[in-house]
Image (cartoon, helix red, strand yellow):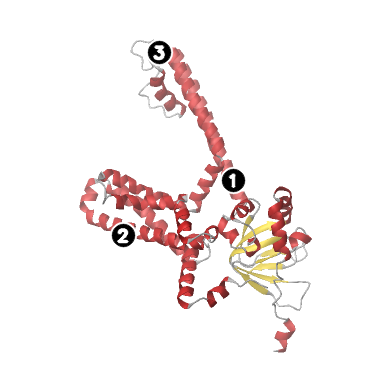
Amino acid sequence: MTQPTSHEIATNAPPASRKDRTLKARLYRILEAGHSHDWQSRVFEGAMATLIILNVVAFTVETVPSIHDRHAFFFLVFDLVSIGVFTIEYAVRLWVCTEHPPFRGLSSTRARLKFARSPLMIVDFLAIAPFYLSFLFAIDLRVLRILRLLRFFKLARFSPAFNTMLRVLTRERDALLGVLIVLVGMVIIAASLLYLVEGDQPGSEFATVPESMWWAIATLTTVGYGDVTPVTAAGKLLAGVVMVCGLGFFALPIGIIASAFMDEFRRQDFIVTWGMAARAPIFSTLNPGEIAELLSVLKARTAPPGSLIATDGERSGALFMIGAGAIELRDVDRPELEPIVLDEGRYWGARSLMTGIQGETALAVATSDLIVLDQEDFRRLGRTRPQIHAKLMESIRAAPDPFAKAPLIEENSDD
């Protein structure tokens, strides 16, 4: 017996419940799912990013007394409108979070409490909390203004570049921590050596190691403020060596971050999120933890309109899932069947993971975001994650033929 689709479930629901569910699902797709080719999602993200940037600009300009005094009412209204928008956004995100795949098995209350503890929701809460706390506690106006700067970090939701930077820093955190430890060691060594060379000079600025550390930091970063400088020949020689070491040292973290960025851009053209993979029916037998592990072998691909994605009969087949857009499929082995068009959420090529031969020719009808699982990665999954591989094999065997309902060309021509 086939499982009813989400559309069939919604159609059979009571009118009020169906309307509520449809509205919630649509808002979830706009706010959380991040469909790159959904114009409403793009407009929302653009508007929110613009509002956040304007808030940062307003915070900066408002600190100028003459401008603040002249336009105090405007700044107050703008802040109230921003708080209202951010509060509504926060509340709606809490409401629609039950549509998020990881929370569908939880009660509404538990799902919302768990979702509220996620990093991005904490940032959203901190962006609005100071305004409401100011009604309960006496908060210095300058502190309140500074706390408004937390709204800047909301850009992490709407900026792919911001998210890329966070992923790169997270992935390279061990290497960057090692660089930081080396920097601290170099500061202590440089300060100690200068203390040893000039610490006994009359009126020396380097009478202690802590006093020498400011000079060490300024010299290693090649800033060289000049407020504290060595006076002896040995001290100047040491300063020169420290400057050269500083130049070489700061090339290290730059190289680490640049290399990580290149790896990130080579790995995928757009970000394959947990939600995108979880929406694919072929992965419905996997639990949230297994889907998270599966993300490491999934690849992303963007296909422009008219581009050839896969060819019937080519070796090393792959499973393709449509994150956004539309794909036209043709079956060369069954020329009597008309081409079919698959849209968002559909997939094809499941059987090719077992046979190693692509079974359909695919063309992009519109700009499409695709999630790809190729045969090589599927086999590697069998070696490293046999349990996930076994579940996927069950789903592949049960996968329906995408051409099962395709009309015959002869029938259409007779009509």
Left or right: 236, with 292 as reference point: left
Picture disc at residue 81:
2
Which of the marked residues, 3 or 2, is nearer the chain's N terminus? Answer: 2
At x 44%, y 20%, the residue is 191
Q: In this view, does 151 lie above or below 11?
A: above
Hey, what amino acid is under mark 2? Val
CB of mark 3 within 8 Å of CB of mark 2? no
Hey, what amino acid is under mark 1? Met
Report x, y in % for residue 407.
70, 80
Picture disc at residue 170:
none
Q: Is residue 273 visible?
A: no
Element type at mark 2: helix
Residue denoted by label 3: 199
Where, quadrant-wise, is the C terminus in this rendering? bottom right
How many C-alpha atoms fall within 10 Å of the one at disc 1: few (<14), some, or many (≥20)? few
Report x, y in % for residue 318.
71, 60
Residue denoted by label 1: 262
